[in-house]
Amino acid sequence: MIVRPRRLRRNATLRNLVAETAVRPESLVYPMFVVEGAGRKEEIASMPGQFRFSVDALLEELESCVALGIRAILLFGIPDRKDETASAAYDEDGIVQRAVRAVKAKFPELCVVTDVCLCEYTSHGHCGLLRGNDVDNDPTLELLAKTAVSHARAGADMVAPSDMMDGRVAAIRAALDAAGFQEIPIMAYSAKFASAYYGPFRDAADSAPKFGDRKSYQMDVRNGREAMRETALDLSEGADIVMVKPGLAFLDLVRRTAGTSPVPVAVYNVSGEYAMVKAAAQAGWIDGDAVIRENLIAFRRAGADVIITYHAKEALEKGLLR
């Protein structure tokens, strides 16, 4: 026998020497939820280890996150007030806007990315303005653009539209440029599927639609070519980073996107993926730490440059990237 691949697997030193894939701490983005009030740190029942923070509690939490090596966060806001026009989303004194100002004042080197969508802010839970029971695409673009500009004014380093309206990247790019924010990049949720993996997030963000579903604007999980078309459209409209969401069930599209994209590719390791790992680990059915590590490696091996994951803090605390 001439070929013996096991020679390079004999011990940890050899395995580490020839390892093909590494996940850098700088590649991770930690999603966080911010709420109104003070002194609030509320655990999310369906996402053990994840919390909703008031602004003051968020700043306290970020002390340990930054010390561990987290360099980027993705902020989601949960307002006390919701209405049909999502007015709290683009309020200059809204919950995300106040959180961004506070975070950047205390942690100026931390990259703060803001989610740009209306679902957390509408009384009906859909991602845009309604016309009857349908989301009205074009009027929604104006509100998304206003939201993005308000985030940039507050000091956000990057905006991330997740609504899946047609043309939203172009609308946001034009609005940012007109407001003097030509340097603010857009990370587009380009291939965002109407997925069953989002359930825990909707609990966390209080964003479940009050009627119907989001299948008329988020993508059909059966379609791969359409995902590539959506990504190409976002690139043509000025996206600086493109994203595939969810991650684990769509690694084929992460790979296809990474093979053709001229810009960095992000993947979102979503709430349902997180919750499944935590639940199985708590039941003793899997080695949770080992599975987290494998999943993060899988995203990187598939070609993701940026990994948005609720496991970010835990992975760094436990040294799972080694």
Image (cartoon, rainbow, N blue to C red):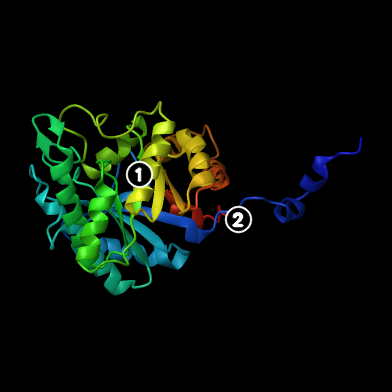
Does residue 96 appear anywhere in the picture?
yes
**Residue 51 to residue 104: above or below:** above
**Residue 250 to residue 262: above or below:** above
* Closer to the camera in the image, 20 or 259: 259
Q: Earlier in the sequence, mark 2 or mark 1?
A: 1
Would residue 183 be found to the left or right of residue 36 on screen?
Answer: right
Please name the amino acid that badge 2 sits on.
Answer: Arg
Residue under the image location 60 percent in, 55 percent down: 322
Q: Helix, strand, or loop for circle 1? A: helix
Mark whose residue sits in front, 2 or 1:
1
Q: Helix, strand, or loop for circle 2? A: loop
Q: What's the mark number on residue 118? A: none
Q: Quadrant of residue 107?
A: bottom left
* Dots 2, 1 in contact, CB < 8 A: no
Outermost residue to the front:
236
Give the residue pinned by disc 1: 233
Does residue 275 appear anywhere in the picture?
no
Would residue 89 be found to the left or right of residue 41 on screen?
Answer: left
Residue under the image location 32 percent in, 67 percent down: 183
**How many labels were placed on the picture?**
2
Q: Quadrant of residue 56?
A: bottom left
Report the Cα–Cα distance between label 2 and label 1. 37 Å
Residue under the image location 28 percent in, 64 percent down: 156
Q: Residue 186, image x and y in percent?
A: 33, 56
Q: Residue 310, image x and y in percent?
A: 40, 48
Would residue 225 be found to the left or right of residue 87 on screen?
Answer: right
Few, some or many residues within 10 Å of mark 1 (<14, 14–19, 20+): some
Please name the amino acid that badge 1 sits on.
Answer: Leu
Give the residue pinned by disc 2: 322
